Image: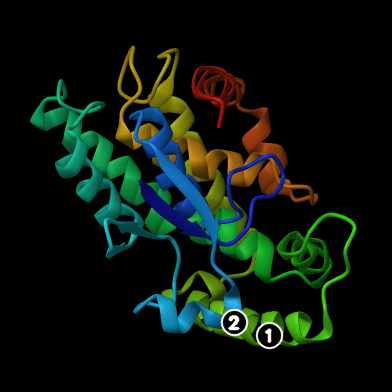
Amino acid sequence: MIEIYGFVPSWGLPDISPFVTKVVNYATMADIPFEYKIQPLDSLASKSPTAKLPYIVDEGSQVNDSTTIVHHLKKRFGDKLDSHLSASDHAVGLAFQRLVEENLYWSGVIYARWRNDEVFSVYLPSFVAPGEEPAPELVEAMGAYRQKIWGAASGHGMGLRADDDVLTNFKADIDALSDFLADKPFLLGSEPTSYDATVYSTYRHIADVPWDWAGRDYARSKSNLAGYATRMQDRFGV
């Protein structure tokens, strides 16, 4: 059985990472049996060559990076979700995947969680069991990890933008998703595809978090995106 390694589930989501959630979503949508396992942070660097999650273990072989994992699972189990798509469909799907993972992720997930002290104080307890207080060593480790994450955001450029600029950028991406989805049941038409695993994951990681942020409220205000998320959840239970 495939083993999917992630951080920890929270907020009714399979994992606090949209990329781990993407892989869980894909495996669920494609009816691929898997076991979700928590990867302790203190041994992450020794377990993952990129020091990132997710990774999977398939018959003793490790595969890293969410997109590489999806490609691996397609080859291993067959392309159950995308085999009907045209080259043009794949081009559109890839464009929206890149919009979500290479831009919206920074403004809607990284910025929202790691920049504001009040939000971070709500986010940090998500790494421990409900009702427990983060241990001092976890607080220290997460503080160092926060500096690393924000350094990456600054290197990307998003971390150097003013709050208003980030929100404007964020809204443009949400508008694009909403406008393209329009009244379609799923991103590319009447049936879900692997690209929905990405879009749905990131939307919920923006709209379903427990802290207040204007971006969360804006995402929730898009009734077609909210309805899309409900359809995905009702159909697949994730």
Q: Amino acid at mark 1?
A: Ala
Asked if the residue at tag 1 contacts the one at tag 2, i.e. Cβ–Cβ closer than 8 Å, the answer is: yes
How many discs mark residues in the rendered view?
2
In the image shown, does 133 or 197 lie closer to the viewer? 133
Disc 2 or disc 1, which is closer to the eye? 2
Residue 132: where, in percent of width, then height? 88, 63
Q: Which mark is residue 42?
A: 2
Is 160 on the left-hand or right-hand side of 181? Answer: right
Residue 69: where, in percent of width, then height? 29, 53
Instruction: Name the residue tied to disc 1.
Output: 141
Task: Say few, some or many: other residues with alpha carbon within 10 Å of mark 2 (under 14 / 14 to 19 / 20 or more).
Answer: few
Q: Is residue 155 visible?
A: no
Which corner quadrant of the image does residue 134 belong to?
A: bottom right
Q: Is residue 33 above or below residue 80?
A: below
Badge 2 marks a residue whose secondary structure is: helix
Is 28 on the left-hand or right-hand side of 8? Answer: left
Q: Is residue 112 visible?
A: yes
In the image shown, does 27 or 112 lie closer to the viewer? 27
Residue drawn 59% across the image and 39% down it: 204
Which corner quadrant of the image does residue 38 belong to?
A: bottom right
Badge 1 marks a residue whose secondary structure is: helix
Task: Say few, some or many: other residues with alpha carbon within 10 Å of mark 1 (under 14 / 14 to 19 / 20 or more).
Answer: few
Q: Is residue 52 above or below residue 59?
A: below
Of mark 2 and mark 1, the one earlier in the sequence is 2
Residue 161: where, in percent of width, then height? 56, 71
Q: Which mark is residue 108?
A: none
User: Marks 2/1: CA distance?
Assistant: 9 Å
Residue drawn 69% across the image and 43% down it: 216
The quadrant of the picture occupied by the C terminus is top right
Is 54 on the left-hand or right-hand side of 143? Answer: left
